[in-house]
Amino acid sequence: MHFCTFLLIACCFWTLSRAAHWSYPSEENSFLKWGGLCDKGSRQSPINLSLREARNVSGGRLQLRNYYEPQRTLIMVNNGHTISLSGFDQGLTLSGGFLKNPYVLEQLHLHWGSEHTLNGIRYPLEGHFVHRNTLYPNLKTAMNYKDGIAVIGVLYHESSEKNYAFDSIIRNLGDVQPYKMLDQPVPLVGSLLLAFLIPSMSNYYTYAGSLTTPSCAESVTWIVPTETYPVKLGQVNMFRQIEYEKEKKLSNNYRELQSKGDRDVLLVSRASGPARLTVPVFLILPFVLANWKFRSN
């Protein structure tokens, strides 16, 4: 990656991650008020997604393009609140469903445990695939518009088997784990195949919500698949080693549930189109071999 591109991504990421000082609950503090729209907004996230309370609709096919392409120029950052990846190819897009425009993938970050709950159940991990409406030039601008951002929120359930796609991230955590590396962008060694991190998109919840971190901008169309994906708790615990202060680890980083209010939550059932991202065999084999080689070293 060219140095100028690297610097631009780093600066944009620093700007978005440094709102005001805020924190997640710890042993000393329960959920704190973050102020501003976070406390006064009417369409805040996350919420509990209830099969009983959602309105069932059909259709709404979503299209994910180029998610099977290995990403080799990613930047990883520990911003004290999460681990985030940016620098994705601009060809990774989300469209269709109830979205009026294409959205391009800008960022992936993780929450341990999950922020959304499904029928009252909290999961060990949630991945946020943050997409920007192509009408707007950058995430900072998109945050000012109700249709600015679309986030796919994937929930991961506890499994006895590893999710090997996460190993592509975990093997790099040591580079950003200590507090001295806070807000320091680090190139991700190796590649990441996003298709292995996203389950079936044929059934999903969608609603109008917000960012789950300050500024809590109410600019997000949330898309949460009903199908969850596996992750081993040992993998989740690796993320809990991230330091947000010197010798203080980020054990959990989820926001408390917000009121649904009078918002309409749609449950899109059996959406037409591909039920799962299809990954070409010629891409799967190198990915599996790379992970096998890493584990055997």
Image (cartoon, rainbow, N blue to C red):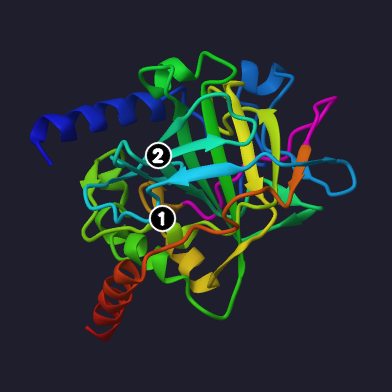
Q: Position of residue 240 (x, y in %)?
A: 47, 59
Look at discs 2 and 1 and give the one toward the viewer.
1
Instruction: Reply yes or no: does residue 11 show up in magenta.
Output: no
Q: Residues within 10 Å of mark 2 (few under 14, many from 20)?
A: many
Vertical position of residue 286 compared to residue 35: above or below: below
Please tell me in which quadrant of the rendered image residue 229 appears.
bottom right
Vertical position of residue 101 compared to residue 273: above or below: above
Instruction: Reply yes or no: does residue 261 show up in magenta.
Output: yes
Q: Position of residue 137 (x, y in %)?
A: 36, 18
Please tell me in which quadrant of the rendered image residue 35 appears.
top right
Q: Residue at x 81, y 53 (%)?
A: 119
Going by the picture, which residue comes out furthest to the front?
273
Q: Residue at x 32, y 47 (%)?
A: 179
Please tell me in which quadrant of the rendered image residue 159 appears.
bottom right
Q: Residue at x 36, y 59 (%)?
A: 193
Image-based side of 138 in relation to 103, left or right: left
Residue occupied by mark 2: 107
Amino acid carrying label 1: it is Leu
Magenta part of the protein: which range? 250-265
Q: Residue at x 48, y 75 (%)?
A: 162
Residue occupied by mark 1: 194
In the picture, which quadrant includes the C terminus? bottom left
